Image (spheres, helix red, strand yellow):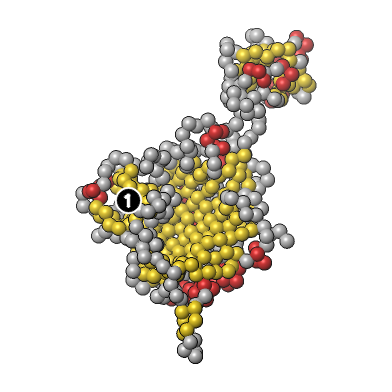
Amino acid sequence: MKKTFYILFFINLISITAFSQKKISCKVLNASTKKPVTYATVMLKKINRGTHADLNGKFEIPIKYKNTGTIRISSIGYITKEVKLSQLKNNGVNIINLSTANNKLDEVIVKTSRKKKRKLLGIQIVKRAIKNIMDNYPTEPHSYIGYYRDYQQPVGDSYQKNRKSKEEIKYLNVHEAIIESFDNGFDSDKLKDKKNQSLLYNYKTNTKFIQDSTLTIPYDNKSKKYSESVYITPLGGNELNILNLTNTIRNYNKMSFSFSNIFNKDFASNHKFKVKRVIFLDATPLYEITFSSIQDKTSYEYNAFGSIYISKQDFAIHKINYNLFYRNKKNHQYSVTVEYTPKKDKMYLNYITFNNFFEASNGYYFKIDKTYFNSKYKIFKVYFSRQAALESIDKRNFKIYYKNERLKVTDVSSFEGSYRIFNVFIDKKSINKIEFEKEKNNPNYSSYFTFEITKVKDLDGHEIDKRASIKINQYREFFVQETFENKILPNQNKFIDKNAPLSKAKITTLQLEHDYWLNTPLKSSKN
């Protein structure tokens, strides 16, 4: 039986604020493969505040820290590296290589009542980790200040070709914010508890990247914007709420996403597990366990794959990556990655990123821009959005109706040699029908005309009104820059409305000794 899976979406509105600060740009690579180290943690020593590398291993640090600052770069499976900012260049992208740790396939054993040793299976490790959640994560109030962003990335080059861009287009509709998220503890409901609130310290629409409103329209799951075989729930809420909901560890006893479902009840039973190896985070050994969905649970419509990293010492979940595909197609329907990091005896959020795939009919296509009637010469002028191929211009392709009655087109010619503007001539009987002198002061006059133009093509061969289907990945991400243990909710009234977009939230002045910064995606470079 065909099943649907659940994702919650909200399209945010746009707000613009000013924010600028000179930064040192870096990129973290695997020393051996030279591939990006995705979401590596970057912390400034002494002040214990930092950022994260993005999907391409890139990050930025304010230049004000250069003379005295040292960054500590860490990631699961790599040897932590310290770099003095004074050694880095101000311009261009600094390459930082991380070496892999001494990861190995380790014998996982447990003693039975008869004192015989046997291997501990992946599912046993996972079940124990879930059982230990309330012991390993904070139940006391705490908060995170971090960098939030949402953006879109075209899949393939169809969007680039559609816009006739010579440069690769990597980011669209980029929105950024600095947010403090207050959490009343793992024994509270993250979304509903009144003590779980957030403050907005900075918000901006990044106009350095393309803002395409045709890709931020609501999902209709039919023709305009859709994700194949997905059930879009009507739940409201803002972008941050939706991102928080996909944190299956924090919401371990609530519905998160298919097929993790209710994590402490369904995750173990919906998947099969395999211990791949023991991997290290500094001196901490972690089980790297791969998993895949059980077809009896997901049907043959879907396949889910991922990895979960669990401490050998206390069975704390450090990281989970979950990817769901529809009918083995190349592009995943969604992907969730959540990472927690130890601080003293508890695990605190490090980052969360949620990525979903969708297709949309793009608005940047060959079409009519505007039309108007030239009363002096008794002709219609038609303006196209792009230059038209002259060989496709034929009077038979131009149909004009006045009050649903067709006018006779006698000729079509370019206006002063322009390939975008064309004169459309009609016969005298048609001129009389439109009664221009009688109707010219009528404010509804223009609505009496209908233009139907077919088979006309632009210079690249795109036919008029044929919308290209654009494939897009949508990202929402939150990267913690500083964690505050035992911090209670402040008494004030500027909390983010959970049912309104972030662009509508009130900005709270951040009065702290040190600042927090936006880790804006870096544009393409030779590095």
| SS for dot 1 | strand
Q: Please give the name of the residue rendered at 32% of the width and 40% of the height, measured from the top-left corner.
A: 92
State the image coordinates of residue 59 (x, y, percent, origin top left).
36, 49
Q: Please give the name of the residue rendered at 65% of the width and 64% of the height, measured from the top-left corner.
A: 295
Q: Nearer the viewer, residue 85 or 495?
A: 85
Q: Please give the name of the residue rendered at 59% of the width and 53% of the height, measured from the top-left corner.
A: 333
Asked which quadrant contains residue 344, the reply is bottom left
Mark 1 lies on residue: 96
Q: Quadrant of the N terminus?
A: bottom right
Asked which quadrant contains residue 401, the reply is top right
Q: Please give the name of the residue rendered at 37% of the width and 42% of the height, measured from the top-left corner.
A: 527
Q: Nearer the viewer, residue 324 or 234?
A: 324
State the image coordinates of residue 393 (x, y, percent, origin top left).
67, 18
| Residue 74 visible in the snapshot | no
Q: Using the image, determine if residue 108 lies above or below residue 523.
A: below
| Residue 408 visible in the snapshot | yes
Q: Using the image, determine if residue 199 lies above or below residue 367.
A: below
All told, the count of numbered labels is 1
Residue 389 as seen in the image, left or right of residue 401? left
| Extreme residue toward the left, this view | 67
Q: Using the image, determine if residue 438 lies above or below residue 342.
A: above
Q: Mark 1 packing: few (<14 Cα in 10 Å), some, or many (20+)? A: some
Q: Amino acid at mark 1?
A: Ile
State the image coordinates of residue 311 (x, y, percent, origin top left).
42, 71
State the image coordinates of residue 75 (x, y, percent, origin top left).
38, 60
| Extreme residue toward the bottom, this view | 114
